[in-house]
């Protein structure tokens, strides 16, 4: 009887964790596309962006074994040369804080192939049990809260054998404002989705400081124009048929609509978009670097998207609570490098092997 209850509890825990996986990874994809679409125009408005964090980000360390691979140009077995890797963070904060103390609902690695212009995106699930960059273990989103973007980048480099020293952080409100500035997007709403969409509007509005009286409920099914709050809430729906798979489809629908409208927008719309969105961003990129990327904007394209860990279980990990745990941590890091860099001969560093051992030990300790 006790065994059945235990199995039932684990099953429910896994189901619950699946439903709580990273909220709205589409948001940062939207920001990436917008940066590419309007980059040439942004050059003239760069003073609106926060580019004062370059020094702190450079202080994020890179594993010695990783650095040796990067420096060995003649034997580039890990195939990391020729890529620009950027950490993308989405924070859900009512105030304008984009640094230490903010909560990261979204953590992503964007990897730009400098030869082909392809950008691959891999989300790191926010509840993933990791070394958070200071040799303590907790959920991944604890790193940003404790030490801001620098520690969050340190976490990514430490666990994933990466060399990241650039980042972009956006607030949740930026997504709502983006869609509103573009005049809303067309979405075909089903009867099943109406209740959940309106319910999510309440929480989303509260999170970003929109008055409850300003919420406009969706009242009928069918194709219709959704405003920013409605569209963002639509992407959060996860309790209809299809669960997370259907939610991902909704995110792609919104992403496509936003990209198409941004590319077709007139100069006045883009002007307002820059005014509204860039003050809500924090980035390590300097003005000169943004100008350089702007010159290549037309050559960029979005490639594959995935989430780390690829193989995972869920359960209680002591003080960290209910967590997403890599099932074979080192093997997941190998898959991560293969996803970003293709046919790589990457082998995990000693640091990654040590993390693998620690996670295995903690799993045994907590009976997971």
Image (cartoon, rainbow, N blue to C red):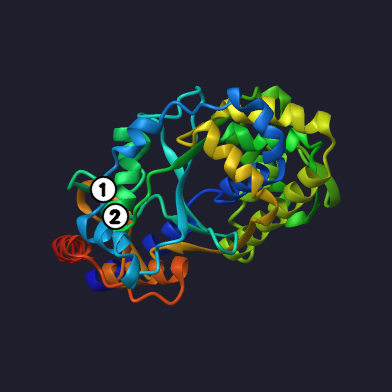
Rendered position, 12 above or below 328: above
The spot of residue 51 in percent (x, y) is 49, 28
Specify whether 297 is left or right of 63: right
Q: Is residue 94 left or right of residue 30?
A: left
Q: Which residue position is annotated with label 1?
A: 138
Q: Which residue was labeled with disc 2? A: 129
- Which x, y percent locates residue 82? 46, 61
Residue 199 in the image, given as x and y percentages of width and height? 64, 41
The foreground one among 166 and 149 is: 166
Judge the density around disc 1: few (<14), some (14-19), many (≥20) Cα neighbours within 10 Å: many
Q: Residue at x 71, y 43 (%)?
A: 231
Where disc 1 sits, the SS reads strand
Disc 2: CA contacts within 10 A as few (<14), some (14-19) or many (>=20): many
- Would you say residue 171 is visible in this rendering? no
Residue 58 is situated, as x and y percent measured from the top left of the image, at: 33, 38
Residue plotted at (30% across, 59% down): 71
The residue sitting at 28% across, 56% down in the picture is: 159
Point out the image quarter for the C terminus: bottom left
User: Which residue lies most toward the front here?
Assistant: 74
Q: Which mark is residue 119?
A: none
Is residue 89 placed above or below 212 in the rendered structure? below
Check whether the beta carbons of the residues at disc 1 and disc 2 lie within 8 A of each other.
Answer: yes
Residue 29 located left or right of residue 104 = right
State which quadrant residue 290 falls in: top right
In which quarter of the view is residue 288 placed?
Answer: top right
Q: Residue at the location (41% across, 62% down)?
A: 81
Q: Quadrant of residue 208?
A: top right
Residue placed most toward the observer, 253 or 18:
253
Is 144 drawn above or below residue 137 in the view shown? above
Q: CA distance from mark 1 to mark 2?
A: 5 Å
Q: Earlier in the sequence, mark 1 or mark 2?
A: 2
């Amino acid at each position: 009887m006790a065994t059945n209850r235990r199995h039932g509890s684990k099953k429910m825990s896994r189901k619950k964790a699946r439903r709580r996986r990273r909220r709205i990874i589409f948001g940062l994809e939207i920001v990436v596309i917008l940066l590419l679409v309007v980059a040439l125009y942004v050059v003239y408005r760069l003073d609106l962006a926060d580019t004062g964090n370059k020094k702190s980000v450079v202080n994020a360390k890179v594993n010695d074994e990783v650095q040796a691979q990067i420096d060995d140009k003649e034997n580039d077995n890990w195939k990391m040369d020729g890529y620009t890797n950027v950490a993308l963070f989405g924070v859900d904060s009512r105030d304008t804080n984009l640094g230490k103390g903010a909560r990261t609902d979204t953590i992503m690695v964007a990897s730009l192939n400098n030869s082909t212009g392809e950008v691959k995106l891999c989300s790191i699930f926010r509840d993933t049990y990791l070394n958070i960059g200071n040799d303590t273990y907790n959920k991944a989103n604890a790193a940003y809260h404790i030490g801001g973007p620098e520690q969050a980048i340190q976490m990514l480099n430490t666990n994933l054998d990466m060399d990241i020293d650039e980042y972009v952080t956006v607030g949740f409100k930026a997504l709502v404002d983006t869609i509103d500035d573009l005049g809303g997007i067309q979405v075909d709403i089903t009867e099943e989705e109406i209740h959940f969409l309106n319910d999510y509007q309440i929480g989303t509005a509260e999170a970003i400081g929109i008055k409850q009286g300003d919420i406009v409920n969706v009242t009928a099914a069918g194709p219709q124009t959704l405003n920013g709050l409605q569209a963002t809430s639509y992407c959060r729906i996860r309790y209809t048929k299809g669960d997370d798979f259907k939610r991902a489809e909704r995110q792609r629908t919104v992403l496509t609509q936003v990209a198409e409208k941004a590319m077709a927008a007139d100069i006045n719309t883009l002007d307002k978009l820059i005014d509204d969105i860039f003050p809500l961003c924090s980035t390590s990129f300097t003005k000169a670097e943004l100008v350089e990327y702007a010159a290549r904007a037309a050559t960029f394209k979005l490639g594959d998207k995935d989430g780390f860990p690829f193989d995972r279980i869920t359960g209680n990990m002591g003080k960290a609570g209910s967590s997403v745990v890599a099932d074979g941590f080192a093997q997941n890091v190998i898959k991560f490098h293969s996803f970003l860099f293709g046919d790589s001969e990457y082998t995990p560093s000693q640091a990654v092997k040590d993390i693998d051992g620690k996670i295995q030990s903690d799993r045994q300790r907590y009976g997971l």
